Amino acid sequence: MFKVKTYNAISEVGLARFDEAKYTVGDDETSPDALLLRSQKLHGMDVPESLMAVARAGAGVNNIPVDEYTAKGVVVFNTPGANANSVKELVLAGMLLASRGIVPGLAYSQSLADMDDATAMNALLEKQKKQFAGSELRGKTLGVVGLGAIGSLVADTALALDMDVIGYDPAISVEAAWRLQSRVQRAENINALIARSDYITLHVPAIDATKDMINSEALSNAKPGSVLLNFARGGVVDTAAVVASLDGGALSTYVCDFPEPGLLGRSDVLAMPHIGASTREAEENCARMAADQLIDYLENGNIKNSVNFPAIAMRRESCCRLTFANTNVAGVLGDVLSIIKRFEVNVADMVNKSRGDVAYNILDIDSDPPAAMIEELRALPHLYALRVICDC
């Protein structure tokens, strides 16, 4: 029986994926095999000895001490793309809100609540509506920084609206590149993208390489009247630089999902309360994906969408499986196979993948492993997180 400890409000759609005959799931589980969470911060919390995996129902993992968990052999999963459509739709809403005078227009209409003459109200609105005139998105240029699951969807939507689209992503994956429409133009660097864009939207992770990537130098290239949208993470934007650009008239509007004190009270800032993924569908998709990834890892040792271990999967060839991680140095797998051979255990199939300093291995064997063999394997240098998965 596996134990899964939950934090935050996880969608029932995801929780229902766990077979009650195999799992106990709840926020009061002790000695958990896995954690399932959304925004709970795990930094500074003790790591249970029993813990094998953590799954975040969302894309970002800055609330998880990934390096610490890696050293302990704990696989950290996220759910890239599960909330992509939800964020994409809010980006579109952000562009429209920044273009059409919708927010001040709504506020003006509400200010007329004391009027009781419909004819007079209509005449006043017809007279005043010109102050809320805006511009269309069609024919404008959108610059997309980060062309992963969300960025590529945003690019597709903009093209469907007859916008020109420029993309920049120095770390784009082959899979993401195949998804991208050929009409998306390629920018050589972020400064070139900003210089050509009427709208700039950010879809990059919060890592050291992206911290304050939108700074005063980058914004010095902004077209007068351009709009910056940040639905990625607050840390990728230097707030002081954005305020200076707004004050100087380069940026006309900053739309973000991460309010800060220096941004509030300004008519040229539309700050939303981190609601990019706050739809029922996104929460269900994230929870379902996170649960499925945990289940496949706990029951089969397969890994998909991990941020610290390699992607690896193998169909079960026998009822007994060994999985283990090791420091990515030469000779470890050979030592393992030598021990297994000495105990006359047959390996039916195996696969090995590495990611940076971490190597991960799956071996299907034809019989229950002797306890003495497992003890010897655990004693090998550079080998850790050894698991025996048998359901014979």
Image: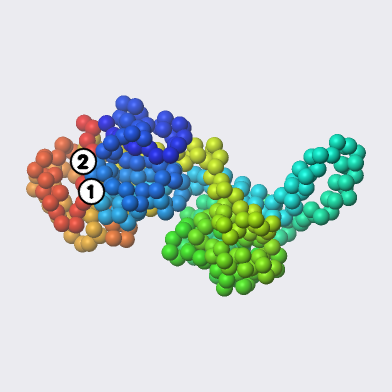
Q: Amino acid at mark 1?
A: Ala
Q: Is residue 310 visible?
A: no
Q: How is the image coloured?
A: rainbow
From the image, state whether disc 1 or disc 2 is nearer to you: 1
Q: In the rendered view of the protein, which quadrant contains the C terminus? A: top left
Q: Amino acid at mark 2?
A: Val
- Which label is found at residue 162? none
In the orientation shown, which residue stands out farthest toward the top? 21
Q: Residue at x 77, y 55 (%)?
A: 134
Asked whether disc 1 touches disc 2, contact meaning CB atoms under 8 Å apart, the reply is: no
Q: Residue at x 21, y 46 (%)?
A: 386
Q: Residue at x 67, y 67 (%)?
A: 247
Q: In the rendered view of the protein, which quadrant contains the N terminus? A: top left
Q: Position of residue 152 (x, y in %)?
A: 56, 54
Which residue is denoted by mark 1 in the rendering?
385
Q: Is residue 270 visible?
A: yes
Q: Position of residue 88 (x, y in %)?
A: 59, 49
Q: Nearer the viewer, residue 295 or 66?
A: 66
Looking at the rendered structure, the secondary structure element under dot 2 is strand
**CA–CA distance in space, label 1 to label 2:** 10 Å
In the orientation shown, which residue stands out farthest toward the front? 114
Which residue is denoted by mark 2 in the rendering?
388
Report the number of numbered marks. 2
Looking at the rendered structure, the secondary structure element under dot 1 is strand
- Horizontally, residue 92 falls left or right of residue 22, namely right
Q: Position of residue 71 (x, y in %)?
A: 27, 55
- Horizontally, residue 177 falls left or right of residue 303, namely right
- Horizontally, residue 338 falls left or right of residue 86, namely left
Give the vertical position of 124 relative to 170 (above or below).
above
Quadrant of res 140: bottom right
